[in-house]
Image (cartoon, grey):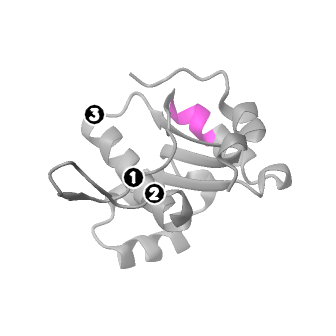
């Protein structure tokens, strides 16, 4: 992976409670780590010899969004022009499920148009990611 020409961002609904924002970022980050294991660096050792697991090798800015903007982004990401980007979304349906089996079952029964997204992570060519999110402010 050419890190100079790649970018990864998360867009999270700023109107969500802080705990849900944190949970959304964590869930999407775990999924990205599984989908893109090559971006997780090697484990490191500190001066005292204690081991620390590797972290992602580049920054992942978290951008401020709202439900409408995230929905709009998700719809654009289904277009062929963006099919090469890695996309992770997290919805109200996913957050409400107690088990993964429940999530699988419920997703089969809902149309994409009925999902309300809490956040979306987008990784890939810097130009494409910037085209979609370049004007969005950081979530602070």
Q: Which residue lies at the image location 27% right of the left edge and 33% below the top edge?
A: 18
Question: Picture coordinates of residue 85 (x, y %)?
Answer: 71, 53
Which mark is first along the chain, 1 or 2?
2
Which mark is first along the chain, 3 or 2?
3
Which mark is first along the chain, 1 or 3?
3
| Front tag of 3 and 1 | 1
Neighbor class of circle 3 (other Cα within 10 Å; few <14, some 14-19, many 20+) is few
Question: Picture coordinates of residue 128 (x, y %)?
Answer: 76, 40
Residue farthest to the left, as pictured: 48
Q: Which residue lies at the image location 55% right of the left edge and 55% below the top edge?
A: 88
Image marks 2 and 1: residues in contact by CB distance under 8 Å: yes
Please provide the residue range marked out in magenta. 65-71
Looking at the image, how many numbered discs can be counted on the residues? 3
Marking on residue 41 = 2
Residue occupied by mark 3: 18
Of 14 and 28, the residue lying toward us: 28
Q: Is residue 69 above or below residue 120?
A: above
Q: Is label 3 in a helix, a strand or a loop?
A: helix
Q: Is residue 79 above or below residue 33?
A: above
Q: Is residue 97 above or below residue 104?
A: above
């Amino acid at each position: 992976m050419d890190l100079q020409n790649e970018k990864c961002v998360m867009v999270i609904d700023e109107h969500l409670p802080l705990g849900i924002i944190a949970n959304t970022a964590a869930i999407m980050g775990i999924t990205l780590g599984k989908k893109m294991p090559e971006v997780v660096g090697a484990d490191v050792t500190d001066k005292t010899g204690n081991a620390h697991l590797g972290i992602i090798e580049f920054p992942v800015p978290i951008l401020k969004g709202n439900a409408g903007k995230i929905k709009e982004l998700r719809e654009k990401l289904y277009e062929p022009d963006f099919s090469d980007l890695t996309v992770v979304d997290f919805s109200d349906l996913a957050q409400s499920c107690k088990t993964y089996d429940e999530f699988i079952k419920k997703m089969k029964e809902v149309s994409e148009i009925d999902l309300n997204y809490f956040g979306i992570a987008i990784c890939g060519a810097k130009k494409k990611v910037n085209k979609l999110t370049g004007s969005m402010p950081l979530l602070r």
